[in-house]
Image (tube, rainbow, N blue to C red):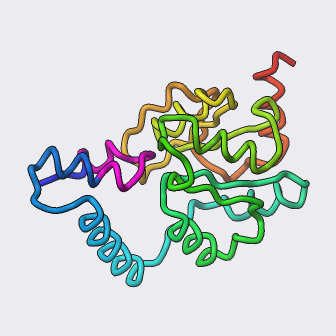
Amino acid sequence: PADLAYCKSFIGSSTKKLCEDSIAHFHLDITADKLLQEMNNEKKAVLGEEGYQIMPGITELIKVLYQKGVHLAIASSSSLAEIENVVKSLGIKKYFTKLISSTHVEKPKPAPDSFLLALKELGVSAKETVVVEDSCYGCQAAKAAGIVCVGFVNPNSGSQDLSSADVLLESFGAIDHRFFKNVLKRSLGE
């Protein structure tokens, strides 16, 4: 059986990759699509009981960034349906200009494809963008895309290696738009 450490090693990658690797690793007699369907059904049941958890201060930060004219996007390894469910359930969908799923790109994180697509969809360059990531793969993908990365030390993401991030953040409580502006300026040598 898989333990939590095994599952956490896939944080930031796609669920499809988790299914494919699990089938190979555990010699399972099931297709990746069928395993993915079963995992999604189980996840739906758990979320139906427990709902989505949101980090303290993140909703307020999203609203402040939006009010300051910052274009926000989500570039996630989750499916578009899952991303839509999360932002709708948390009441934050209207703040995001784009929702990008790993299903929109050829290669999931740690490849930069999701972030490169987000840049294109937003019509911005990597030099004017900051990514917030809580996974090793996500930080690696941001850096591979040439984007400044703020690594969020998320207690729910296991012990992720965020060493490729430009700066680490443990809380969203005292963060505002100036923080991101300063991180971006620092990365540009200003």
| 121 left or right of 29 in image | right
Count of marks overlaid on the render: 0
Q: Position of residue 158 (x, y in %)?
A: 37, 46
Query: Farthest right residue?
Result: 68
Q: Is residue 12 magenta?
A: yes
| 65 left or right of 78 in image | right
Q: Is residue 96 magenta?
A: no
The image quarter in which residue 16 lies: bottom left
Range of residues picked out in magenta: 6-18
Q: Position of residue 166 (x, y in %)?
A: 63, 26
Query: Farthest top residue?
Result: 189
Which quarter shows the N terminus? bottom left
Which quarter shows the C terminus? top right
Task: Identify the residue at image location x=82%, y=54%.
Answer: 65
| 178 left or right of 99 in image | right
Q: Position of residue 114 (x, y in %)?
A: 59, 45
The image quarter in which residue 60 lies: bottom right
Work out whether 11 lies above or below 100.
above
Task: Identify the residue at image location x=32%, y=77%.
Answer: 41
Work out whether 166 lies above or below 46.
above
Task: Identify the residue at image location x=10%, y=60%.
Answer: 29
The image quarter in which residue 187 lies: top right
Task: Identify the residue at image location x=20%, y=50%.
Answer: 22
State the residue in front, 62 or 27: 27
State the residue in front, 112 or 164: 112
